[in-house]
Image: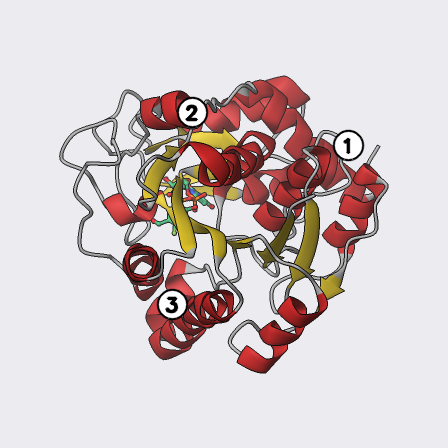
Amino acid sequence: MKNILITGGAGFIGSHTAVELIEAGYGVIVADNLSNADTTCLEGVEKITGQKVPFYQIDCCKKEDLRKIFTENRIDGAIHFAAFKAVGESVEKPLMYYHNNLLSFITLLEVMVENNGGAVVFSSSATVYGQPDSLPVTEDTPRKPAESPYGNTKQICEDILMDAVKAHPCLKGVILRYFNPIGAHPSALIGELPRGVPNNLVPFITQTAARLREELRIFGNDYSTSDGTALRDYIDIVDLAAAHVSALERMTGHNPDGSCEVFNIGTGKPISVMELVEKFTEVNRVPVRYKITGRREGDVEAVWADTSRANKVLRWKASRSVEQTLANAWAWEKKLRGIN
Ligand code: UFG
C-alpha cells in the first residue's frame, strides 16, 4: 500500500481527498495545525471509511515536526493543502501569508528530499489566471500578475515545485489548478466549515438558507454576462478530490519524462452567481434572501476551465451535476445546524 501525507488534511478539500484516497486503497497520514479547522471532518473521514487516520497536529513550517512524521511512517507522496486562503486577509497581512504559505511548502519539499523524495501534488488555483484574455482557460493560458498576496503565493509555490522537480530527480510533481470547489460528501459527514462570516458564495448561501445570515449580497449585476452577475466554474468537492487520486496515479507510472505537469480541475461549464442561487432554491426548496450590491474588489468577471488535458491525460472528468452538489451542500449545513 502506498502512504500519502496530506498536509491540511483536516480542512474542506483535504478531508474529502483523504476519503477518496482511502477508498482507492492508499494509506493516509494527516498533518494539520488546526489553525483553520477542527477535528470534525477528520472524525467524519473515519466514519465514512471505517478506518483510523493517523493525525499529527503540527505546523508544516517546523522542519523537526515534519521530520517526525517521515521517521515514524514510510511516506510515498504528499498532497499539500496546508495554507492560508483568505484573499482579503492576505492583503492586510501579506507577511503572514508569505511566511506560512511559502515556508510550509519549502519545508515539506526539503524533508521529502531528505527522505528519498516521492510524488507531490500542489493545490493551486484558478486565481493564477486572473481575468484571462480568452475563455475557457487552458493550462497554457498565461498566468496574470497576482491580484493579492494569496494569489501570489500560489504562483510562487507552482514555480518552486517546478524548479524542485527539475533539480531533484527523486521528486515528482503535479500542480492542480482548482476552479470553485463546492458541495459536501453525500454522507453529510464532512463538508465546508468556514470560521466566522464565510467569504465564499456557497457557504454564504447555505448559512443564509439556515437563517444564520440575514441575506446574501450578490456582488454586482453589471458584468457583461447574460444576467449581469459573474461567471465561475463550480466543481463538486468529491469530483475534485478524486482528481488527486488520478494525479498520484499519473506520477507513479505513466508520465514519460517526469516533468511537473499542470492540470485545470473544473467542470468546463460556467454558471452565474444568480443562476447558482436560483438552482439552490429550486433543488432544495428553501428560500435564500438576497440583495444586489456593488462589485467586490478584486473579483474577475468570468473564468471557467478547459479541462481537456485532465480528461485525456489524467483520465479524470467531473461527473456530478451542480443540482446534486447543491443538495449535498444543503444536507451538510442542515446536519450541522440540526435542521430537519
Ligand atoms: N459572491 C457573492 N456574494 C458572496 C460571495 C461571493 O456574490 O457573499 C460572488 C463573487 O463575487 C464571485 C462568486 O460569487 O463572483 C464566487 O465567489 P467565491 O468567493 O465563492 O469564489 P471566488 O471565485 O472569488 O474565489 C476563487 C477561489 C479562491 C481564490 C479566488 C481568487 O475560491 O480560492 O478565486 O479570486 F482565491
Q: Which comes before the other along the chain, label 2 or label 1?
A: 1
Q: Which residue is mark 2?
A: 267
Question: Residue 90 shows which numbered tag?
Answer: 3
Q: Secondary structure at mark 1?
A: loop
Where residue 39 appears, as percent x and y from the top left, is: 75, 59
Q: Between 161 and 267, which is closer to the camera in this rendering? A: 161
Q: How is the image coloured?
A: secondary structure
The quadrant of the image that shows the N terminus is top right
Say which amino acid is labelled 1.
Ser
Upstream in sequence: badge 2 or badge 3: 3
Q: Which mark is residue 11?
A: none
Instruction: Indicate the amino acid at tag 2.
Output: Thr
Q: State the SS at label 2.
A: loop
Mark sitting earlier along the chain (3/1): 3
- Residue where numbered disc 1 is placed: 187
Q: Nearer the viewer, residue 282 or 120?
A: 120
